[in-house]
Amino acid sequence: MGNEKIGVPLKAKTTDDLESRFSHTSLADFKNNVQSAQIAYLGGTATEGPQQNSLSAWVAKNNPELDTQVQKELEAALTALEAVPDPVEKNMTDAAALAKLKTAQEAVLTSFATFEGKVLPLVKEKA
């Protein structure tokens, strides 16, 4: 999501490649994507917290610091997306809005890098 759904339109500074450019719901779609990853990781919503049989619980058992890092990065990505002016489709020429979108993209990419670089190797090693 960080490179394609956010990165391509951000680089072009145009709405042409935004996920939902006609309905003006791209930002909501971005947030939903991150929330879906968070729900999958926690085994439920963030307000419910990690569930007993979740990936989060398994990571916490094997590497508690990594679990904390993943949860914080997912929250940081959502917080960064919340800061982007909505609808993003009407703000693709606004420098301040683009800066916030860039910050959100970086937060999403950080979370993805942690999953790919730390969580996945842990699962492969321990599972």
Image (tube, rainbow, N blue to C red):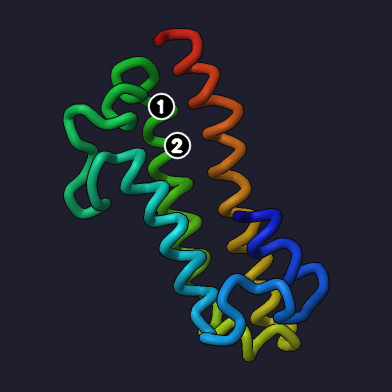
* Residue 86 in the image: above or below residue 61: below
Q: Position of 88 compared to 11: left or right?
A: left
Task: Tell me if mark 2 has few (under 14), some (14-19) or many (20+) residues whose alpha carbon lies within 10 angstroms of its own.
Answer: few
Is the Cβ of the residue at disc 2 closer than 8 Å to that at disc 1? yes
User: Which residue appears farthest toward the right when viewing the image?
Assistant: 12
Label 2 to label 1: alpha-carbon separation? 6 Å
User: Which residue appears farthest toward the bottom when viewing the image?
Assistant: 90
Q: Secondary structure at mark 1?
A: helix
For badge 2, the amino acid type reads: Gln
Q: Secondary structure at mark 2?
A: helix
* Residue 51 in the image: above or below residue 87: above
Give coordinates of residue 31: x percent, y percent.
Answer: 45, 65
Q: Position of 51 compared to 88: left or right?
A: left
**Dividing the image into 4 quarters, which one contains the C terminus?**
top left
Residue occupying the point 38% across, 56% down: 35
User: Which residue appears farthest toward the top when viewing the image?
Assistant: 126
Residue occupying the point 58% across, 54% down: 107
Give coordinates of residue 104: x percent, y percent.
Answer: 59, 63
Q: Which mark is residue 69?
A: 2
Q: Position of 87 compared to 74: left or right?
A: right
For badge 1, the amino acid type reads: Glu
Count of numbered marks: 2
Residue occupying the point 38% across, 35% down: 68
Q: Which residue is mark 1?
A: 65
Taking depth in this image into account, of 83 and 31 the one nearest to the observer is 31
Taking depth in this image into account, of 67 and 10 the one nearest to the observer is 10
Give coordinates of residue 95: x percent, y percent.
Answer: 74, 83
Give coordinates of residue 70: x percent, y percent.
Answer: 44, 38
**Dividing the image into 4 quarters, which one contains the N terminus?**
bottom right
* Residue 121 in the image: above or below residue 29: above
